[in-house]
């Protein structure tokens, strides 16, 4: 998801260069993402926090194991942010998962642990994680 957001471009706004930006945000540098540019206005700091979370999750940091929970007043754009991400995901290449798995398990988890080093040598892909309990039972 992070790569999808960043692929549309990033514009860095600096308060020193633009007096309007300085008046609104102070001297904090603001990153405006092309992915959200046409749909959202005035929530650049919120979008920056969201993209920082997605970046950490894509790097398999602590956020990769946590649930993103959007909190805010009615009309703040929480659902709209998620809808725009969802629409873009539809256009992305497919994501494969195991049929019937409630966790949408990654198919590479079916490879036994003792064969994973060979797959890493052959394909250059490191397989992390295990099957969910439902898939193990099947």
Image (cartoon, helix red, strand yellow):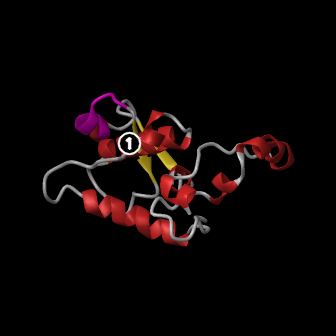
The residue pinned by badge 1 equals 48
Magenta stretch, main secondary structure, is: helix
- Magenta span includes 24: yes
Question: Quick one: 20 or 85, which is closer to the camera?
Answer: 85
Image x and y of residue 124, in percent? 79, 45
Q: Residue at x 76, y 44 (%)?
A: 116
Q: Nearer the viewer, residue 3 or 116?
A: 116
Q: Quadrant of the C terminus?
A: bottom right
| Residue drawn 31% across the image and 41% down it | 45
- The answer to which image quadrant residue 15 occupies is top left
Q: Is residue 22 above or below residue 124?
A: above
Q: Is residue 12 shown to the viewer in this render?
A: no
Question: Residue at (50%, 66%) from the top-left corner?
Answer: 89
Q: Position of residue 85 (x, y in %)?
A: 42, 62
x, y (%) of residue 26?
A: 27, 30
State the residue in front, 77 or 44: 77
The answer to whether 59 appears left or right of 28 in the picture is right
Residue span colored magenta: 21-28
User: Compared with residue 45, is residue 108 higher up or lower down, i.e. above or below?
Assistant: below
């Amino acid at each position: 998801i992070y790569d999808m957001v960043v692929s549309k471009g990033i514009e860095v706004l600096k308060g020193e260069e633009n007096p309007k930006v300085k008046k609104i945000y102070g001297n904090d540098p603001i990153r405006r993402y092309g992915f959200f540019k046409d749909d959202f206005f005035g929530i650049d700091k919120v979008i920056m926090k969201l993209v920082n979370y997605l970046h950490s999750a894509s790097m398999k940091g602590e956020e990769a194991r946590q649930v993103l929970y959007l909190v805010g007043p009615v009309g703040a754009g929480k659902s709209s942010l998620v809808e725009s991400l969802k629409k873009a995901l539809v256009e992305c290449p497919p994501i494969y998962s195991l049929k019937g798995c409630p966790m949408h398990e990654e198919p590479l988890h079916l490879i036994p642990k003792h064969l994973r080093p060979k797959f890493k040598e052959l394909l250059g892909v490191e397989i992390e994680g295990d099957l969910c309990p439902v898939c193990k039972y099947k």
